[in-house]
Structure formats: C-alpha cells, structure tokens
C-alpha cells in the first residue's frame, strides 16, 4: 500500500502549494498599496 501513502502525500503537498500561492496572491494587493 505504499502507493496510497505516496498519492496522499503528493496530493497534500500539491494542495499546500496551491493554497500558499492563492494566499500570497490575495495578500499582494494589500501590501502594494500605501497606508492611508
């Protein structure tokens, strides 16, 4: 059953990368605007 752990780990790593990219893109406009 090593393939199950490999698929699960790869899927979780890909999900973490996608969520990290989405979070970074969501924070980018907030950081680029000057404070009022």
Image (tube, rainbow, N blue to C red):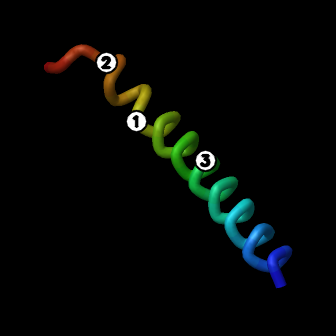
Quadrant of the frame with the N terminus: bottom right
Give percent across and percent down for residue 30.
34, 30
Tag 3 and tag 1, C-beta contact below 8 Å: no
Q: Nearer the viewer, mark 1 or mark 2?
A: 1
First in sequence: mark 1 or mark 2?
A: 1
Q: Please, what secondary structure does the residue beneath circle 1 have? A: helix
Q: Please, what secondary structure does the residue beneath circle 3 have? A: helix
Residue at far left of view: 36
Q: Indicate which disc residue 33 carries.
A: 2
Quadrant of the frame with the C terminus: top left
Residue at (79%, 69%) from the top-left corner?
7
Q: Indicate which disc residue 17 carries.
A: 3
First in sequence: mark 2 or mark 3?
A: 3
Residue at (57%, 55%) from the top-left corner?
16
- Position of 27 with respect to 3 (left or right) is left
C-alpha distance separating marks 2 and 3: 25 Å
- Residue 23, above or below 32: below
Q: Please, what secondary structure does the residue beneath circle 2 have? A: loop
């Amino acid at each position: 059953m090593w393939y199950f752990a490999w698929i699960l780990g790869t899927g979780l790593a890909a999900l973490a990368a996608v969520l990290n990219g989405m979070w970074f893109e969501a924070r980018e406009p907030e950081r680029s605007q000057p404070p009022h």
